[in-house]
Image (tube, rainbow, N blue to C red):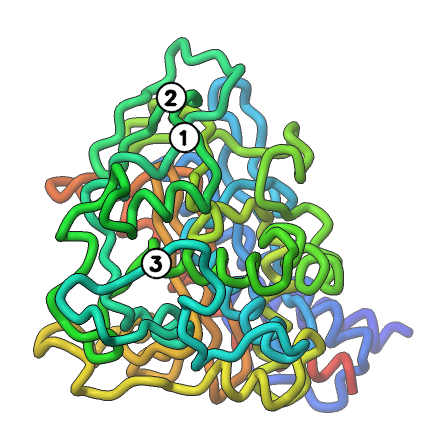
Amino acid sequence: MRFITLLTALLIITLSSCKEKKEVNKITKNQYFEKYQLTRDCLTKELDSIAKQDLINGFGVAIVNDHEVLYTNGFGYADRENQIKYSEHTVQHIASVSKTLIGIALMKAQEIGYLHLDDPIQKYLPFNVIHPIYPKDAITIRQLATHTSGINDGENYLNNAWIILPHQNLKNVNTHYPYQRLNSSDKNMPMEDYLKHYLTEDGKFYQSENFIPHRPGTRYNYSNIGATLAALIIQRATNISFDNFTQEYILNPLNMDSSGWSFEDIEKSKHSKLYRADNSAIPFYTAVTYPDGMLISSSNDMAKFLVELIKGYSGEGTLLEQNSYKEFFKEQLNNKHFDKDQRNPNHPYDGDYSPAIFIGHSALGYVGHSGGDAGVGTWLYFNKEKKTGRFIVKNTDNSDNDNRANELQYYAIWDKMNEYIDQLNKLSKKIAH
């Protein structure tokens, strides 16, 4: 017993600097577990040190492998004024990472037999969507899912999609946001009505800039409107609302019990406030185009989702059949679909480099999606070779171009997780075996 106690003490001394050292031979499973816990504690200490720089009000993180959640936590404040801590159970919307659920839902709807990716979208819509320059070219669901439909996010998307939720105190709240207008609640409308107004010639939001001057299927152009239209097609094809379809086939099976598409679906007391970079609060808001970015979730729930994505990529997923996951992750485009300077071959987390079905591959071996909205930033990526992944969500805008300190801190958090991910993964496998 004295030998084991001394060995345990030696391990603690070895790891006190939060750096991995050479392993002692014949360590027991319990001692690996101690080392695993200590490594997580070291990561928590380092992330807490970054959080105390106070450039981001609050954030949640998760680290996973292809079998389990290795680490989740929250730092800073979900409510700065009332000193409410941000935890791994704090919820907020996750911006465009939400689109990965549209992709999974499309593949599930195809599995069940409701639709096919190569179907023309017109087969499912009650209004005509016609590219004004190429009216004879039928837009397909696959083109929506790979952002090659020719549909564009114009001014009437940025100015009309977001809605301030009613019945909230707007005193000391910043309702001005320079990149997307936050509209009063009386401007809300059904998703289908909004898309009809945006995409049909007699619609009140229709403009020539709502389409790019390229033939459908030929040019990559990231489109939130196109993503929302794909969600509407799921809704029309299945006769189940998009939120209910994803609840039944994604959120419930993964026990993502804290997640949903509206305030009615989640525990409001756990919802984080959202902030500008100057720490002024932003009102709670939703979007008429909610499938493109309004999933409300926690880092704890998104960790479960990320584990499933890695399992799916590895042929062990539970939400979809193996062939469906292969199609979901299949790289769909090539160089001819991009402008010369549109892709970044040096960015490890640029999911736009090689799109799949509402998810993307970077040039350096990662798969995932990123997101950003008023008061929100998110990244969700996994390493294809190592089968490990990370998630981060924050409740604060990036700083403006003259002061990137907030944004650089966001990257520092992401990089700090990367320093620990291999060690946590190795230790978890030692414990499992």
**Left or right: where 359 falls relative to 175:** right
Q: Residues within 10 Å of mark 3 (few under 14, many from 20)?
A: few
- Residue annotated with mark 2: 184
User: What x and y, as percent, mark residue 362?
Assistant: 33, 78
Going from the N terminus, do you reach mark 3 or mark 1 first?
Answer: 3
User: What x and y, as percent, mark residue 44?
Assistant: 56, 53
Q: Residues within 10 Å of mark 1 (few under 14, many from 20)?
A: many
Q: Residue 128 shows which numbered tag?
A: 3
Q: Is residue 168 above or below residue 209?
A: above
Q: Residue 163 shows which numbered tag?
A: 1
Distance Cα–Cα, label 3 vs label 2 = 29 Å
Q: Is residue 168 above or below residue 180?
A: above
Distance Cα–Cα, label 3 vs label 1 = 26 Å
Quarter assignment of residue 27:
bottom right
Q: Residue 307 shows which numbered tag?
A: none
Quarter assignment of residue 305:
bottom right
Asked if labels 1 and 2 touch by Cβ distance under 8 angstroms, the answer is yes
| Tag 3: amino acid | Asn
Tell me the SS state at disc 3. Answer: loop
Asked if labels 2 and 3 touch by Cβ distance under 8 angstroms, the answer is no
